Image (spheres, rainbow, N blue to C red):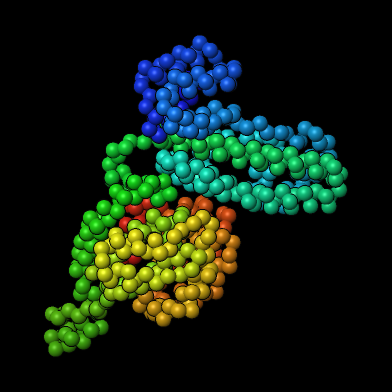
Amino acid sequence: MEERILKFIAALRSTGVRISLAESSEALQAVQTLGIKDRHLFRLCLRSTLVKESQHLPFFDEYFEIYFGGADNPPLLNPSEDLSPEEIDLFQKAIQGFNQSLRQTLQKLFQGKPLTKQELERLAKMVGLSQMNDMRYRRWMTQRMLKALRVPEIRAALEDLAKTLAEMGMHAARLRRLIQAMQNNQAALEAQIHQYVGQKLSENMGTHLPGEAVEALFDRPFASLSERDMERLRHEVQRLASILKTKVALRQKRAKNGFLDAKATLRANLKHGNVPIEIRHRQKSLKPKLVVLCDVSTSMRFCSELMLSLIFHLQDLIAKTHAFAFIDHLEYISPYFKHGHMQQSIRQILQHMPSGYYNTNLGFSLENFNADFLHTLDSRTTLIMVSDGRNNYNNPRLDLFSKMTRRCKRTIWINPENPLLWGTGDSEMPQYAPKCDVILQAGNLNQLIQAIDQLLTA
């Protein structure tokens, strides 16, 4: 309990609550004297020793619920205890029709087992929770972990399980109790994840260093960046683009003569008795022609913003760029970059397309592109998609995407999400992926720079 109280104090400090070492010591001594059996008295004990200003009370209340609002593992029921051996056998046969992942989860709900610490940490790693340090993202990160756990699929699986067990002859009343108990266990798992996210975020806030070097942000997942972090990266983009430009330009200079053309060399040196005095090369255009479609919804905004900034700082290395932004529809944004400062142009684009949650419609955006801008794609074009492939269960319009990929030289998809999350929830990446030539994960700035380097020098 002492360790938890210290983490609770560190989390309060991260929000700006001033707590001295002496006050921390007083809080621990008071708890030791009064005990923790009476939760109300325990709460008053901490509040009276740690909080001195009324404006800090909301922070105290929120974090107290995170750290002391319930047990580490919410209580789960064990529905199997109320079933006969025959009914348990029916259940085991019924879940054989589901894939292995769903079978394991249904078995966990059936036995009333909470998520283990290792399972929570694995889910947290998949969604980048360890890098987050802003409590405002608690609900969003909870939803991401629930998607990684495939909760929407579990809900549908429970409905299918109920139908299967009914067809197999399980008594209706006992079936209702079984499904209700499993649904209650699922709700308990969701509460466990919500509590874990809150604790993890508060721990991260307590250990986050305000003066963290900007280079440390290059490896931070985009989803974990705060607006303050992003502002620091915006100032770094031009410097990073200059470094990348020098590196790519040097490669292009070394390769400017193209590849050795053996046939042309032999023909040119017939007069020299086929001694290769004059070397001929096949010339190759090194500057790519790009069409870039960027998702600027809430989950993708930072990644797309940095992608656009880097691309337009590297215009000397690109023959032609057509840039588009989309959320629920497509906008042609290249004209924004013809005049004015880069950051100002980016800001205008983002203001013109305000983001929201769960309003992305990639399929409709592809319809917009095919209707008005299909002519920008030709045999010299590299099509770049910057998106997590999530479409809110709308029509993905794979037919239109296939048409686009056939018209261009190659298609590159840059996705910040971990590949383990592709295909979960509303993700359509498994459907789009086979139609792409290259898929690059770019979950942080370093990976994004590597992706741009690859597409400019391939």
Q: Residue at x 44, y 57 (%)?
A: 300
Residue 172 x/y as whole percent: 85, 45
Lateral position of residue 400 relative to residue 340, left or right? right
Q: Is residue 171 above or below residue 276?
A: above
Q: Is residue 332 above or below residue 392?
A: below
Residue ID at (36%, 20%): 21
For the C terminus, give its image quadrant: bottom left
Could one spot residue 408 in this view of the protein?
yes
- Residue 239: give x, y in percent of width and height: 23, 55
Instruction: Count the labels in the image.
Output: 0
Report which quarter residue 49 is drawn in: top left
Measured from the top left, where is residue 20 in percent x and y?
A: 36, 22
Of residues 352 and 134, which is closer to you in this image? 352
Q: Is residue 98 visible?
A: no
**Image location of residue 51, percent across then percent down:** 43, 24
Residue displayed at 63% across by 32% down: 74
| Residue at the front extreme of this rendering | 54
Residue 193 appears left or right of 49: right
Instruction: Indicate left or right for 110 with 395 as reference.
Output: right
Along the line of sight, which residue is nearer the eye, 57 or 161?
57
**Residue 300 versus residue 244: which sits nearer the camera?**
300
In the rendered view, tell whether residue 417 sits above or below residue 272. Answer: above
What residue is drawn where x is 44% and y is 29%? 54
The residue sitting at the bottom extreme is: 271
